[in-house]
């Protein structure tokens, strides 16, 4: 869901996205049911030109925090962070 939202927002903000890969990592509790205690989402972005870093960060932030109902649900009990990495 985050990836689709990010692609749509980056397109809306006219950023030259060529490819996007979303990587999700997390830490789990030792005891069953081994619930996630932390989730980190990394957006690997490949560009076809120069970007406006402020718009890219806004798109990623909105994709996670404004438009994703799953993120909104999980983040109430589990810290979720996100970041992006540029690839040229």
Image (spheres, rainbow, N blue to C red):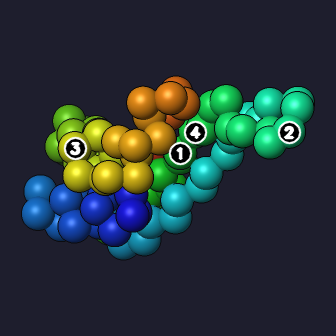
Whether residue 64 appears in this view of the structure is yes
Nearest-to-viewer mark from 3 and 2 = 2
Please say if the residues under marks 3 and 2 sit with CB atoms less than 8 Å apart. Answer: no
Whichever of labels 3 and 2 marks the residue nearer the N terminus, that label is 2
Relative placement, left or right, of 38 versus 58 is right
Which one is in front, 65 or 56? 65
The residue carrying mark 2 is 32
Is 17 placed above or below 61 here?
Answer: below
Q: Quick one: label 2 or label 1, which is nearer the N terminus?
A: 2
Residue that mark 4 sits on: 40
As drawn, the label of residue 66 is: 3
Front residue (pair 55, 28): 28
Whole-percent x, y for residue 5 in the image: 28, 62
Label 4 Cα crowd, 10 Å radius (few <14 / some 14-19 / many 20+) = some
- Write down the quadrant of residue 53 in the picture: top left
CA gap, disc 2 to disc 1? 23 Å
Mark pair 4, 2: CA separation:
21 Å
Secondary-structure class at tag 4: strand
The answer to the question of whether label 1 and label 4 lie on touching residues, with beta carbons closer than 8 A, is yes
For residue 41, the mark is: 1
Q: Earlier in the sequence, mark 4 or mark 2?
A: 2
In this orientation, does residue 88 appear? Answer: no
Labels 1, 3: front one: 3
Quick check: 73 left or right of 24?
left
Provide residue 74's location: percent of width, then percent of height: 47, 41
């Amino acid at each position: 869901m985050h990836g689709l939202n990010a692609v749509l927002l980056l397109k809306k903000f006219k950023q030259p996205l060529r490819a996007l890969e979303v990587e999700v990592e997390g830490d789990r509790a030792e005891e069953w049911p081994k619930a996630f205690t932390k989730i980190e989402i990394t957006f690997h972005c490949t560009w076809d030109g120069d970007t406006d870093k402020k718009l890219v960060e806004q798109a990623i932030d909105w994709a996670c925090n404004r438009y994703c109902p799953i993120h909104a649900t999980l983040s109430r009990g589990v810290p979720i962070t996100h970041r992006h990495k540029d690839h040229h």
